[in-house]
Image: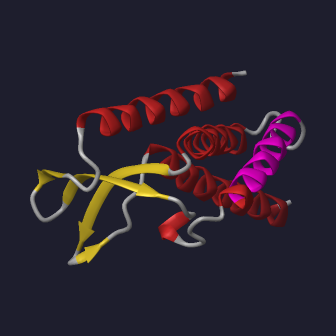
Amino acid sequence: MRYYALAIFVLIVDQITKWLIVTRMELGEQITIINEFFYLHSHRNRGAAFGILQGQMWLFIIVTIIVIIAVIYYLHTEAKGNVLLSTSLGLILGGAIGNFLDRLFRGEVVDFLDFYIINYDFPIFNIADSSLVIGVGMIALAFLLESRTQKEN
């Protein structure tokens, strides 16, 4: 149950931050947080990660529904008793629902976290995206640890 609480927490933080960006900043407006490193940048994305597949809204809605169902299934079956895997699935669930709600109600995803890393302008993202990436990384770690444990036994 605490993994659903984590998903709800991610969803709430994601939606509040997006609401703040939409209501307090003009589209395209940029606020410097740390010069030459971190900016808040009001941006909209009608595609997937890094802006790929622009305008394929129905595809994203269908895929997200499938992902949400799969994550809930795995939370109740494969992830039982595995804290790392359950936590990662909770993060993925919250992030998937956050971007899903944007697509469903806004027709686009609100992005606003803009980083420049060693002269590279990283694609603008949001809290839901961060949660998804961290969750997927944690799943990879969980599988690596599990395969390592199986090799030792």
Q: Quadrant of the N terminus?
A: top right
Q: Position of residue 102 (x, y in %)?
A: 55, 42
Point 66% across, 23% down: residue? 2
- Taken as a whole, is the magenta stretch helix, strand or loop? helix
Instruction: Please give left or right for residue 66 compared with residue 40 in the image.
Output: right
Q: Is residue 124 magenta?
A: no
Point 67% across, 40% down: residue? 93
Residue 152 falls in image quadrant: bottom right
> Which residue is at the far left?
35
Q: Position of residue 70 (x, y in %)?
A: 83, 46
Q: Which residues are magenta?
A: 60-76
Q: Position of residue 24 (x, y in %)?
A: 24, 34
Pick the front one: 48 or 84: 48
> Which residue is at the far right?
77
Residue 63 falls in image quadrant: bottom right
Pick the front one: 108 or 87: 108
Q: Position of residue 27 (x, y in %)?
A: 29, 51
Instruction: Please give left or right for residue 102 compared with residue 78 in the image.
Output: left
Point 13% across, 52% down: residue? 32
Instruction: Please give left or right for residue 129 compared with residue 145 in the image.
Output: left
Pick the front one: 35 or 81: 35
Instruction: Please give left or right for residue 34 compared with residue 77 in the image.
Output: left
> Which residue is at the far bottom?
119
In this rendering, the answer to whether 86 lies above or below 111 is above
Point 44% across, 44% down: residue? 127
Q: Quadrant of the C terminus?
A: bottom right
